Image (cartoon, rainbow, N blue to C red):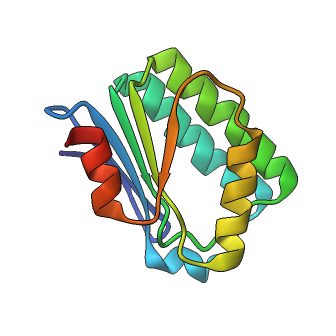
Amino acid sequence: MKILRDDELLKISFDEEKKLIWTEWNPKSFKASLSKDEIKNINKQIADYIVEYNPEYYLADQRQRGVVYTIDIQEYIAKVLVAAVEKANVKKTAIVMPKDYIVRLSNEQTINEIDSDKDYNYFNDFDKAWNYLFG
């Protein structure tokens, strides 16, 4: 597995064998106070890696995400990440939902902004997300 980013907020990995981009928010993100530009930059970086590595699968593990997305950020993420997933022709996307109630609500609102023919599947359980992708 190739580590593309690993810091106090986020880990991004690419598994060449599985053709998987895997993003995982770190627990310290709960305490992070990020600007809108920082949130946009993180999600743009994820989108850029999706396009660059052209994975068949995308796993977004957001269980530890502590950042709440405002409406304009939700729209930005839906636009940028969907464009990347479609450009890379990702076959399956699995999103493991945040644990925090407010963060989860902002995630659900982001999901509602997605306008795509691709399937974006959401899970409360990591193992179910993994099985959806590779089971």
In percent of width and height, residue 22 lies at 35, 47
Residue ID at (61%, 39%): 44
In percent of width and height, residue 66 lies at 60, 74
The residue closer to the viewer here, 36 or 105, is 105
Horizontal side, residue 38 vs residue 129: left or right: right
Residue ID at (45%, 19%): 88
Horizontal side, residue 14 vs residue 91: left or right: left
Residue ID at (34%, 62%): 126
The N terminus: image quadrant:
top left
The residue closer to the viewer here, 24 or 7, is 24
Quadrant of residue 32 in the image?
bottom right
The answer to whether residue 123 is visible is yes
The answer to whether residue 3 is visible is no
Residue ID at (64%, 68%): 104
The residue closer to the viewer here, 58 or 105, is 105
In percent of width and height, residue 74 lies at 76, 49
